[in-house]
Amino acid sequence: MKRYLILLVAVFALNIGSLLAQQGMQPAKKLPPTLQREGVVNASPDEVWKLISVLDKVDEYNSEFVTSVEKEGDGYEAYRLVKMTDGTERGEEVTVFAKAAKRICFRSEDSQYPVEYYVVNYYIEPSGKSKTKVRLESYFKVNKGAPKTKTFKAIGKELSTTLKGIQNYYNK
C-alpha cells in the first residue's frame, strides 16, 4: 500500500511540474517576412497550385528571370537548379510542400544575391469565385558590408515579377 501511495504522489508531482512548465512557455510566433508581395490571380487555387507545384514550370511564368530549370524529384525535399537570365544559377530545395494548405517553400542554396540565406514561401488562398490570392513571403539576411538597399530592391523586383508572371499566365 505504501508503494502505491508513493507512486501516486510521484505521478501527481510529475503532472503538476509538467503543467507548470507548459504554462510558462509562450506559443511560437511567426516572424514577419523580410519582404512580401501579394496579388489576386484569375484562376482557382487548384489551378495555381498545379502551376507552381510542378517545379520545372517556373520558366513558364517567370521568364523575365528564369531561362530553364532542371529538377530532381517532386514535392518535399525536391531540388531544382534554376538558370537565371543573367547567366547565374541558383539551387533551390523544397522545404515545405503542403498540398492541402496550398503552400510551398523554397530554400536557396546559392543565391545570386549577397545574402546569408534566402527563403521564399508561396501561399495560395481562395479570393472569391475562380480567383486566388497569392502571397510571396521572403526571408533573408543581407551579408555584412553588402549593399542593403540594392539587395532589397533586387529581391523585391524578383518577387513582384514572379507574382506578375503568375497573374499574366492566367490572362493569356
Image: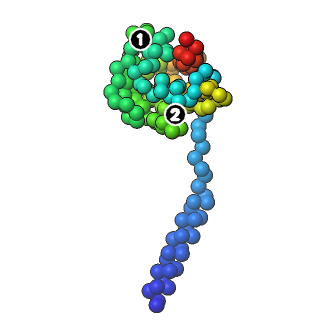
- Residue type at numbered disc 1: Thr
Q: Is residue 165 visible?
A: no
Q: How many marks?
A: 2
Q: CB of mark 1 within 8 Å of CB of mark 2? A: no
Image point (60%, 50%), residue name? 27
In the picture as drawn, the residue positioned furthest to the bottom comes out as 1
Q: Is residue 54 visible?
A: yes
Q: What SS does tag 1 mark?
A: strand
Label 1 environment density (alpha carbons within 10 Å; few <14, some 14–19, many ≥20): some
In the picture as drawn, the residue positioned furthest to the right comes out as 128
Q: What numbered label is drawn on residue 67?
A: 1
Percent across and percent down for residue 42 are 61, 21
Label 2 environment density (alpha carbons within 10 Å; few <14, some 14–19, many ≥20): some
Colour mode of the rendering = rainbow
In this view of the protein, which residue sits in the foreground, 46 or 12? 46
Image point (49%, 10%), residue name? 64
Quadrant of the image containing the C terminus: top right
In this view of the protein, which residue sits in the foreground, 138 or 49? 49
Instruction: Establish if 131 lies above or below 157.
Output: below
In the picture as drawn, the residue positioned furthest to the left comes out as 72
Q: What SS does tag 2 mark?
A: strand
In the picture as drawn, the residue positioned furthest to the front comes out as 129
Instruction: Establish if 167 lies above or below 122.
Output: above
Percent across and percent down for residue 92 are 41, 26
Residue wearing tag 2: 103
